[in-house]
Amino acid sequence: MIQIDTSRCVLCGMCARVCAAHCFHLTEKAVHVRHEEYCMHCGHCTAVCPKAAVTLDGVNPDTLEHAGPFPSQESLSALIRGRRSLRVFKEDAVPRETLLQALDTARYAPTGKNLENVSWLVLEGRDTLRRVSDSVVNVFRGEERMAALVRSHDSGSDPIFRGAPCVVFACAEGAYDLDIVNCSIAVATLDLLLPTMGLGGCWAGFAMRAASLDDKVCAAMGLNGSLRPLAGLMVGLPDLHYRRIPPRRALRVQWVGGEKA
Ligand SMILES: Cc1cc2nc3c(=O)[nH]c(=O)nc-3n(C[C@H](O)[C@H](O)[C@H](O)COP(=O)(O)O)c2cc1C
């Protein structure tokens, strides 16, 4: 529900400008709320109002945390370029408090239609992870190009989760056509955040693929309802340090329209 405090509102119209669902109508004398049924509850109206005059869903705007300051471009660019997929983990468990902090931050990653429909499944402990990787590998048995991976798993190695002490999956029901995107953005956000907290991650693509092919993998993860594990990340403490940034393919960009610089 959207409420406007008329004693604070200065008719600047910022709420109307930012609202993707066109819920605000600005006149010379007032801001009117309309078509509230289309509200995505994204909170842009309450976040942008210079006078804290917009209350969304009963949350007093004076109680909202202030945004920023943001890291510098240099700092964020160093993180984006310097983070690496981690496949060499310490045996130590990931402290739940630290992981919870990271997941709590990833809640702010964008979701299509602001559905905020991503929830997390955390798999911990050798036995659990071996049971899940057994089920993942079973999906690939008989696939010629997966023969080496299956052999490696059967010989006691862990090509699926690389010995990580913990694997997290961003889950959604998959009913919305962009759910895989929503879950992937959540995991990508987490992946970027982990190195700032002394942790590292690596996408669990084999497990994601196997879970999309066979419900037995979801069941081995303990998911028997409608939630699907759509994006996954191995998580743990790094047992190495990447000193250099490896080369990447050259930037490829096509510009269409606009002015030449
Ligand atoms: C969707 C996706 C799935 C991946 N699946 C796996 C995987 O199952 N196992 C693994 O060791 N690495 C996996 N990776 C990691 C990639 O191999 C890695 O991102 C790539 O080699 C680049 O290395 P960097 O992340 O250190 O830049 C995956 C990455 C992505 C984005």
Image (spheres, helix red, strand yellow):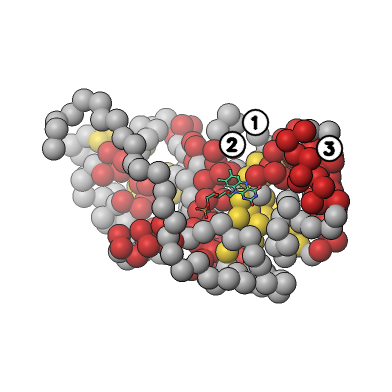
Taking the spot 84% from the left edge, 58% from the top edge, the residue there is 156
Residue 178 in percent (x, y) is at: 55, 33
Q: Give whichever of 206, 172 is nearer the camera.
A: 206
Q: Amino acid at mark 2?
A: Asp
Taking 156 as reference, is 76 left or right?
left
Q: Position of residue 42 (x, y in %)?
A: 44, 44
Q: Tell me the kind of residue under disc 3.
A: Arg
Q: Judge from the rendering whether residue 156 lies leftward or rightward of residue 247; answer left or right.
A: right
Q: Which residue is mark 1?
A: 175
Q: Residues within 10 Å of mark 1 (few under 14, many from 20)?
A: few
The residue depicted at 34 percent of the width and 41 percent of the height is 251
Residue 260, above or below 162: above
Query: Residue 129, located in which quarter of the rendered image?
Result: bottom right
Circles 2, 1 touching at the beta carbon (< 8 Å): yes
Between residue 39 and residue 83, name the one nearer to us: 83
Give the CA separation, mark 2 to mark 3: 28 Å
| Residue 195 in sight | yes
Position of 24 with respect to 93 (left or right) is: left
Cα gap from disc 2 to disc 1, whole angstroms: 7 Å
Q: Position of residue 106 (x, y in %)?
A: 53, 56
> Where, quadrant-wise, is the C terminus in this rendering?
top left
Which residue is identified by label 3? 141
Residue at the image position 65 percent from the left and 34 percent from the top? 174
- Please say if 93 is above or below 68: below
Query: In the image, is residue 73 above or below residue 232?
Result: below
On whether ligand 1 comes within 8 Å of the CB at mark 1, the answer is: no
Counting other residues with Cα less than 10 Å from the Cα at mark 3, is it few (<14), some (14-19), or many (20 or more)?
A: some
